[in-house]
Image (spheres, helix red, strand yellow):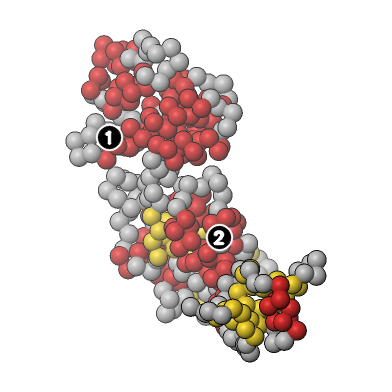
Amino acid sequence: MKTIVVIKRDRMNKLFASDVITGKKVTVPKGALRRGHNGTGYLESTPKGWKQVEYEQPALEAAPDKPAPGSPAAKHAEELEMIHSSYSIKPKSLMMSEIKWKYLIRSAVRGKNIMMTGPAGCGKTMAAKSLVNSLDRPDFYFNLGATQDPRASLIGNTHYNKEKGTYFSESLFVKAIKTENAVILLDELSRAHPEAWNILMTVLDEGQRYLRLDEASGQTTVKVAPGVTFVATANIGNEYTATRVMDRALIDRFTQIEMDVLNKDEEGTLLSSLYPHVDNATRENIAELAWITRQESSQEEGKLSTHISTRTSVELTGLVYDGFTLDEAAQVSVLPKFDSAGGLESERTFVKQLLQKYTSDGSSDELFTDVEDEDNN
């Protein structure tokens, strides 16, 4: 294969040749270098040596035109950049996979209704609040699980005084849905009163997006402002006895993102980031204890019906940081979550047995005192 070189001068003003394709330097006799430099500037290798040739550099491909500022293409490019670079702004204390975090951000950017699901204490509300902080948009928080009067909380109240007579006062929720680009957090949606779900049906429906103010004069209808994103948290499953079975039509109005249960290593990483000054062995013990209870509760014939959540393991580590021993911290933050019915066969006793291997001195003579007292009574 023939080689064509271009003749140039280096910083020392010396002539040299480089391959026009690869750019690598090529050894060429000095006489040929001078002839090439004084001639066409290019040489081609032949069996008899180097000869001058005419050569035209191939035209470079034109760079694609940048979309005009403010155009749909430019806006889409900005959205893509935000979505796919967003993992760098995820809080370190939020243990969430990159793909799920990007999906969460993308759903918010696209104005989707988002439902965060997963076991209690796994970080659903933290993920929702982290989303709000990352987007830097107006935000509103409503704990629907604590709402006793859904109509008052979501629509408003009718009042009376001597000067105004009867008048209607809009709720904060009405203000929220009228705020453009707002992120509205609906916490504990699965614990809300069914009437709250009925009110939210038209608000969350992509084809409707309005709220009817029945109590207002003239039955005013409020449209949901452009760019509003609803983010709900929900515990879905038979184990959550205080929750209600949500209407499928309501669930289908959401993009669901399931929070993962952390494994032992992930739990340890989280505890390390939150409490770096707690002894590493203690943090690892807490992470392992939590993981064992999760495995046990997930088995069909497991000895536990619930487990130590991430929220509980964080609290447990915080107590150790504040000077409690691990067994003291477990007695006040872990054991009350497990049923003591059944004495020595109870779930609480099983967890106490697990705790024995993690106590500071390896012994646990007093762990079963209360169980024995219960049996004696």
Q: Position of residue 13 (x, y in %)?
A: 80, 70
Outermost front residue: 48
Q: Quadrant of the C terminus?
A: top left
Read off the residue under disc 1.
296
Q: The residue under label 1 is which amino acid type?
A: Glu
Query: Disc 1 and disc 2: Cα gap in Å?
Result: 36 Å
Q: Position of residue 316 (x, y in %)?
A: 48, 30
| 262 lies above or below 216 | above
Q: Quadrant of residue 14?
A: bottom right
At 65% from the left edge and 72% from the top edge, which residue is drawn?
28
Q: Residue at x 52, y 64 (%)?
A: 84
Residue placed at 38% from the left, 29% from the top?
Answer: 289
Does residue 32 show up?
yes
Quickly name the residue at label 2: 86
Residue farthest along the left direction in this orientation: 301
Residues tagged 1 and 2 counted as in contact (Cβ below 8 A): no
Left or right of 153 on screen, residue 339: left
Secondary element at tag 1: helix
Q: Is residue 299 above or below residue 286?
A: below
